[in-house]
Image: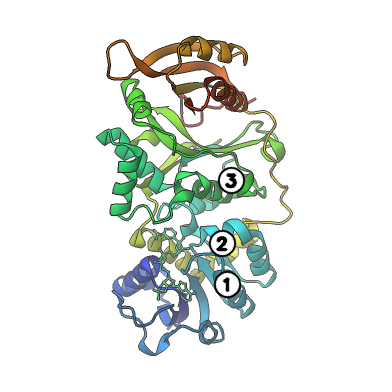
Amino acid sequence: MPTAINIGLLGCGTVGESVVRILTERSDLIQARTAGRRIQLQKVVLRDPSKPRRVALPKRGISTDPTQLLQDRRIKIVVELIGGIEPARTWIEAALRAGKDVITANKALLAERGPELVTLARDLGRVLMFEAAVGGGVPMIGTLRQSLAANQILGFSGVLNGTSHYMLHHMHDQGSSWQTALSEASRLGYAEANCEMDVNGSDAAQKLALLAQLAFRTQIDWKQIPRSGMESIDEVDVAWSKANGMRILPLAVARPMDRRDPVGSNLYLAVHPALLPQYDRLAGAEGPENVIAFHGDALGTLTLRGQGAGGMATASAVVCDLIDVVLGRARATQKCAPLWDESWPAWMPPAWTPPVPHYLRVFARHADLVRTVHTTCESFDVTVTRWEPIDAGKPGESRGIMATLSEANPHAVTQLQAQLRHRLGPDGTTLTLPIQQSELGIPAR
Ligand SMILES: NC(=O)c1ccc[n+]([C@@H]2O[C@H](COP(=O)([O-])OP(=O)(O)OC[C@H]3O[C@@H](n4cnc5c(N)ncnc54)[C@H](OP(=O)(O)O)[C@@H]3O)[C@@H](O)[C@H]2O)c1
């Protein structure tokens, strides 16, 4: 009869409790999928053991001290679900050095210290798995690593942050303001007290870096990924997108501009809100969902869509990793398809970025606004292809304009925007959004 495999849990909050629930409520099903091996939770490390829990934990296995868990030789797998950089990093390292395999959902830690932890795991002959760190329950890493293994990845794009997607969705469907959408996201638990990294694009950039390095075998510093957030999006922008059959999505994009050399400075990576046709496959996602479209040279396009966060959805990915480790599949795959490798070349932001048409919105009570916008655009070789005034609510008055611009390099559009703000003075505010004809919308050279 196969022996049970003992595991330890670092942290038992939203995700940790759901992991325990899945292991308890679906124990027969999981045992059937681990070749008969039972997964036995031995020890749990918590910050406050007196807090009530929604699941039953091993009574004599609860502690605030990780040493007992990390030094317990019976424990073969450690699941880290405390989050943050420290003490998570120290404890993961100690677990690996103690000969244990590790599973984590900690994207923040991986974005900062991933290479050294994965290298350490490999050097010690252990595995470090992190499916839940990107896309919550949506199996993006496994799909890239396994299901698309026969494909050269031609690019991928998607929504990797559920909070900002929920907010834009709310603004689109309810016509609400950014502030109202944020309050609603907080009320429903989709936005944390400090959701700055969600709305400014940093969270999505960290996830994009994790996925892109796997897809293109390159090492990416997420801080170098150009990103813009959704803080400046106004109700008028959302109303314009609706009236023109489009949606604004918080998009993360990865695409090699030269298929023969997909790494180095040839890989276009960006996180920014963008306008997409309402019928686009990415535009169908709802509320806090995540969605991603992978483009493979053999398969074509594959879209995954589902719950990018939440206890049970994220725990679903954690337990899949657990099954893979118990079966030995994770170790076998790690040898031939590493999640990270220090020998991979470092990614550099490309000097050239593909031109796309843009939407421009300007708020300014300026006597000569239309002419100022036209002349500023012309000085950057950009044409205003269409424009309309923004109604100020009083006859004959406008409070700004909305326009579409001819194809231009995003870098040039940023400079154009700065010049425009300079000419309009302190009262002028501007927003530009790329208009993508399809989810990638970038011509390959
Ligand atoms: N929640 C999601 O939807 C989601 C989605 C994807 C990825 N993730 C990732 O999953 C991980 C866990 O997230 P979560 O939402 O479950 O977090 P959470 O609800 O805040 O739970 C954190 C757990 O860690 C424990 N803990 C924190 N600091 C500790 C310390 N210094 N010593 C001992 N225990 C400590 C807490 O103990 P107490 O309970 O005693 O306070 C709690 O049980 C994070 O890395 C997060 O980024 C979460």
Amino acid type, label 1:
Ile
As measured in the structure, the alpha-carbon distance from the residue carrying label 1 to the one carrying label 3 is: 24 Å
Residue 334 position (above or below residue 282)? below
- Label 1, residues with CA under 10 Å away: few <14, some 14-19, many ≥20: many
- Whether label 2 touches label 1, CB < 8 Å: yes
Residue 309 position (above or below residue 297)? below
Disc 3 marks which residue? 212
Which of the 4 image quadrants contains residue 168? top left
Q: Is residue 95 left or right of residue 263?
A: left
Residue 265 position (above or below residue 327)? above
Amino acid type, label 3:
Ala
**Residue drawn 49% across and 65% down?**
83
**Residue drawn 48% across and 40% down?**
229
Quadrant assignment for the C terminus: top right
Disc 2 marks which residue? 109
**Residue drawn 50% across and 46% down?**
204
**Residue drawn 73% across and 47% down?**
345
Q: Is residue 238 left or right of residue 78?
A: left
Label 2 SS: helix
Quadrant assignment for the N terminus: bottom left
For marks 1 and 3 on the same chain, the one whose residue lies earlier in the sequence: 1
- Whether label 3 touches label 2, CB < 8 Å: no
- Between circles 1 and 3, the one closer to the viewer is 1
Observer-nearest residue: 128 or 424? 424
| Residue that sits furthest to the left in the current view | 174
Q: Ligand 1 is found in which quarter of the picture?
A: bottom left
Label 3 SS: helix
What numbered label is drawn on residue 339?
none
- Asked if the residue at label 2 sits under 8 Å from ligand 1, the reply is yes
What numbered label is drawn on residue 92?
1
